[in-house]
Amino acid sequence: MKPALIDTDILSLFFKNNQTVVSKFKSYLKYYPTINISIITYYEIVSGLEYKNAIKQLKKFYNFIPYINVLPITSDSADTSAEIYKSLRQKGEILDDLDILIAGIALSNNLVIVTNNEKHFKRIKGLAIENWSK
């Protein structure tokens, strides 16, 4: 099992107590001391819960934060993301900037991206992908 970066959709399934995802989290934590998410995922979760006014779920997320590793956008990950953007645009493929930034963080930290959004991320050269919802 390779060190992982958890994407927003998988983290959402975890908080919805999806047993397949919860089981994968437990297995992962036998090998690694912490779960990694990107600052982008942090933003997506908080903004979505704020929009829904989901105070209880937001509190649950904030209580979870001290136990995980939130990876920032760095100059290295931004440069990697810019290369991804260039490569996709040259092929005429469009991908959401937030997904490109998440992929850049994963690649620059040598992490596999754990996502249910395989369709988008599989277009990124060199990015290892796992889907813990299956």
Image (cartoon, helix red, strand yellow):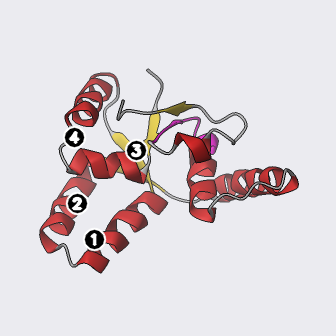
x, y percentage for residue 85? Answer: 75, 57
At label 1, which amino acid type do we have? Answer: Leu
Is disc 1 surrounded by few (<14), some (14 to 19) or many (20+) residues within 10 Å?
some
Name the residue carrying label 4: 18
Q: Secondary structure at mark 1?
A: helix
Q: Which residue is mark 3?
A: 36
Q: Which residues are magenta?
A: 107-115
Is 74 on the left or on the right of 72, as rendered?
Answer: right
Q: Is residue 128 left or right of residue 19?
A: right
How much space separates mark 2 and mark 4, taking CA atoms?
Answer: 16 Å
Which residue is disc 1 drawn over? 49
Tag in front: 1 or 3:
1
At horizontal 21% and vertical 54% (from top left) the residue drawn is 64
Rendered location of residue 51, percent (x, y): 31, 79
Q: Earlier in the sequence, mark 1 or mark 4?
A: 4
Q: Which numbered disc, 2 or 3, marks the residue that appears first in the sequence?
A: 3
CA gap between label 2 and label 3 equals: 14 Å
